[in-house]
Amino acid sequence: MKNIDILPWTEKYRPKKLDEVVGQLDAVSTLVAFVKSKNMPNLLFAGPPGVGKTTCAMALAHELYGDSLQGNFLELNASDERGIEVVRGRIKDFARAVSMGEAPFKLIFLDEGDALTTDAQQALRRTMESSSMVSRFIISANYSSRIIEPIQSRCAVFRFMPLKEKEVIAALEHVAKAEKLKIDEEAYKALFYVCEGDMRRALTILQSCAMQSNHIKAELVHKISAQATPKEVKEMMEFAVKGKFKEAREHLDKLIITYGLSGEDILMQVYREVPKLSIDEREKIKLIALVGEYNFRLVQGANERIQIEALLAQFALSSGK
């Protein structure tokens, strides 16, 4: 029986040093310079989930403090502790204390800072000002627009981009070697397709696949991630744009039964496959407009099955065949 690690792979393989971080080269090179100089401004890490914001913050803290990390580094998840009491209490008390390490300041990391209430952010702004001699803040946010302007202006903003395919695959190859997994080339491409640059999601899916087999194929990746293969979605759409509604509807039934996809899941995959269709560019524009309209209908609570079939019908009608 295969031994199961206690830690999820997202934590087990989280880089401990900045030079081990995948992608985000511009941000990493600047953070390395901060470590060397033992000085840095307050930082705002903005970007989608799973692209290295938390990893960079943790690696920066480890390199700054080494063995004296505890007592000099405070990590809080703002989505759990988002009220003004946390800022006025725990954060303020920690920020006022003098650093005990080589770096002349303590470090406070607020993960998911965009979940902080407006009142809490206003209090945080004042704390950042009053403790600037002894503390620095790192705030990560999926949506930087939800961070108030006074805090943004006090931070150096780093924009984290979704990871590229070669970066994700390189990291997965490292994990596969460590875990003694055999992963097909098509499976690597499938992992990138379903994660869309989110390394955390890629590792989670890979670990789930590894629990079933040491030899990972593309079919297993799509099954575990509950996403249809791009080929199946594209075939359904090609039938629709050729006016073959019955065949397109049969493909839709197959997707729903085989993968248990929701209407929104199917719609998102349709959206991703439209640019790959072998049709005129103006026709692609019309199809994207239709996808947008039916996405709005789903958001408003319309029946998913009826709306997806109606979308395929509109694809068939727009083809004029």
Image (cartoon, helix red, strand yellow):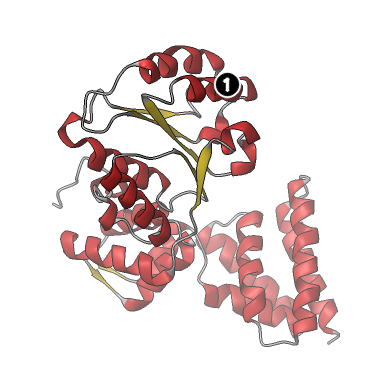
- In the displayed structure image, the side of residue 67 where residue 300 appears, left or right: right
Residue 61 seen by the camera? yes
Q: Position of residue 106 (x, y in %)?
A: 32, 27
Q: Amino acid at mark 1?
A: Ala
Residue at 35% x, 57% y is: 29
In the image, residue 8 above or below residue 272: above
- In the displayed structure image, the side of residue 111 where residue 303 appears, left or right: right
In the image, residue 19 above or below residue 177: above
Report the front residue among 159 and 31.
Answer: 31
Say which element carries label 1: helix
Q: Position of residue 149 (x, y in %)?
A: 64, 35
Residue under numbered circle 1: 120
Q: Quadrant of residue 91?
A: top left
Residue at 36% x, 52% y is: 204
Q: Position of residue 153 (x, y in %)?
A: 59, 38
Is the residue marked by circle 1 packed among few (<14), some (14-19), or many (20+) residues within 10 Å? some
